[in-house]
Amino acid sequence: MRQIEWAMWANEQALASGLILITGGIVATAGQFAQWYLGTYSIAAGVLICLLEYPRGKRRKGSTMERCGQKYLTRVVKVFGPLTSNYYIRAFLHLGLSVPAGFLLATILGTACLAIASSIYLLAAVQGEQWTPIETKPKERPQVGGTIKQPPSNPPPRPPAEARKKPSEEEEGAGVPVGGPQENPMPVTDEVV
Amino acid sequence: MMGCWILSESLSIILVLSWLGVNLYLFIDTFRWYEEEESFLYTRVILGSTLAWARASAVCLNFNCMLILLPISRNLLSLMRGTSSCFRGPWRRQLDKNLKFHKLVAYGIAMNATIHVSAHLCNLEHYHWSQSPEAEGLAAALSKLGDSPDETYLNPIRTFHTNTITELLTTVAGITGLLISLALILIMTSSTELIRQASYELFWCTHHVFIIFLIGLAVHGAGRIVRGQTAESLLLHNVTFCREHLAEWQTAARCPVPQFSGKEPSAWKWVLGPVVLYACERIIRFWRFQQEVVITKVVSHPSGVLELHMKKRDFKMAPGQYVLIQCPSISSLEWHPFTLTSAPQEDFFSVHIRAAGDWTEALCKAFGAEGQALKEPWSLPRLAVDGPFGAALTDVFHYPVSMCIATGIGVTPFASLLKSIWYQCCESQTQWKLSKVYFYWICRDPGAFEWFADLLLSLETRMSEHAKTHFLSYHIFLTGWDENQAFHIALHWDENTDVITGLRQKTFYGRPNWNHEFRQVAYSHPSSNIGVFFCGPKALSKIIQRMCRLYSSADPRGVHFHYNRESF
């Protein structure tokens, strides 16, 4: 099996669990069932998990597809340093968050999903993976004039580069274009419909 | 034929709307039934509308679970495609969109599952609450039914001194429901595009959890905890009267104690058929996997393209189709699609494989494409081939004039077509409808030309031998070159054969001017139906479609371009 980065699947699973916890929490709180305060807890935990899991980590090999608008959350998640980049901590965090929700019927599914996500993160941590933020490359300002080394010595039309590297006696007649005017081998028309 | 185009575009929309329509009909019909049905009146007293929500979404779930296995039974689909009497033209194209439909049904299952689970959560809580000491009135009285030996129960939760989680985990429906939901979530999180591309094996293996899903689904209703009043009890116990006269239930003869029974499970009836079909499908795939594929020729082209000639018993193909190839020594789970490049008239079938990823690179290496010593036939890895699948390009022969446009590697289905034309050219007895083929190939890399150039060269020779030089008119456009190449080309401009391809027809440089091309073709064939076939990127597809519309004349007797949107 080609080596998969388990964290990718754990991330999807944890994000789904967060959403399920939020849904279950809403059902419990709105229905005012017994111990519905656990429902409010689930909503809060779910939101926290979604915010934590939304920014995708950088893959070890190849390019990573970013989620829409994740760069803002990446900045926030990056601030916590090893708390968020270490997957052992993440696994235990998810396990811990899932336990209280396990006591309420509406959120028991969320608990089970989050526990599975936690175990996949544990597997990822054992494999040595960690969360690295996807940095946006700063836009390179084009250096004005930086690439012009030596201005051309003859006016256009100019023969191709190899032909230009002729000995310097040709430069006496450099002002006169070689050959007739440019002839296009194919008739050129514009593509305006 | 214009109607055909409109039909094929809107057929997908019509099918999706029909699916949606059936879902909505089932949902609304079941919802109304459970909201109005007398036998469930007492159940509604305890549960409210959430009963109807749960049951309506359950019926939709049954319907969608029935449909989900059908689009991925590709051998069944091939069978349907093969029976050309019922599945022609636009219908056949729909069969190629099977995976999209599978995903659509999966989303339907996810949505209905959410509604179903949420509704039943509320139901369990309502049942629990109506056993509490604070519950009064009809709900409380109904919940107490079933304690005496001659009574049947309505409320599956028998006492308040339990919690709902325990109740969930001690009923068949509860445990299977939890299992099914977990299975569904695992399947969905491992099927995202990212995971499929990163590790196909994880996606494939996790997807097999659907077996647990279907078994759980079949068993889910066995506990019969959705209970309604029995028909006999309804005759004796008039609900509209008795619900107002709770106090008289034990005493009055008009209101004997109501009797309840559980609804029998129905999910297995919906999914049994498709499960049997899918089981047959897997058996067929396994049998095809066991079938021997003999590799008769291996050609390694300098452009990094590996050509494999193979033979398999009872293999029949049409131009434009593809096969799925598996190499157990590289990966026992991955099947990769490759368009067939041989003609049906040949006694072998061939594919051209370019090393563009892990699997293809490993395959090229295994077949000795890296320039090592020649491999012996017995040391070549075993291959398994499934197929052929896909829409055939045979529609080309149904038009008097056809234009075939391909970009880059998209030329492969047309290679098969041109070879087929080459063979049929020899059998001059067959009177064809097709009298002219225009072939356009737009390519960035001249190195990619070379395996196809041989084909065009032999085609050119063959055509001139049979005095049919005007049958095929091909135009090759090279869109990428460097200065050295440009210099070289300019130097050899006036020669008879093209400097890059060696063909008599000169290569053009830069992108084609489609206005010019379409205008010329329209001018040469003023009153014909011209079929346009394209294989390449979407942006160019839009341009070609625009050209087809632009240059088709409004006069029904004039020239008409018919764009055939095939995905190869």
Image (cartoon, coloured by chain):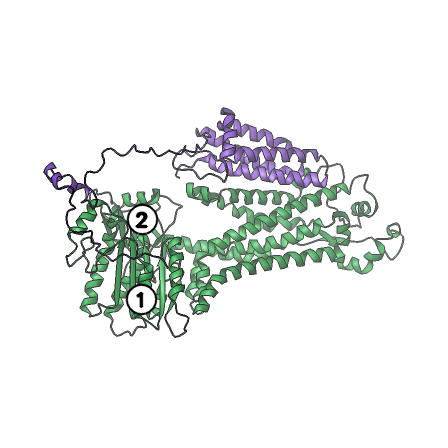
Chain colours: A purple, B green
Residue B541's spot in the image, x, y percent? 39, 57
Residue drawn at x 88%, y 50% as measured from the top left: B247
- B288 sits left or right of B500 in the view: right
- B23 sits left or right of A150 in the view: right
Q: Quadrant of residue B39?
A: bottom right
B276 up-or-down from A91: above or below: below
Label 2: state its secondary structure: loop
**Which quarter of the figure is the N terminus of chain B placed in?**
bottom left
Q: Quadrant of residue A34?
A: top right
Residue A119's spot in the image, x, y percent? 52, 33
Residue B484's spot in the image, x, y percent? 19, 45
- B181 sits left or right of B336 in the view: right
Give the amino acid at mark 2. Arg
Residue drawn at x 23%, y 58% as measured from the top left: B455
Q: Which mark is residue B521?
A: 1
A96 up-or-down from B121: above or below: above
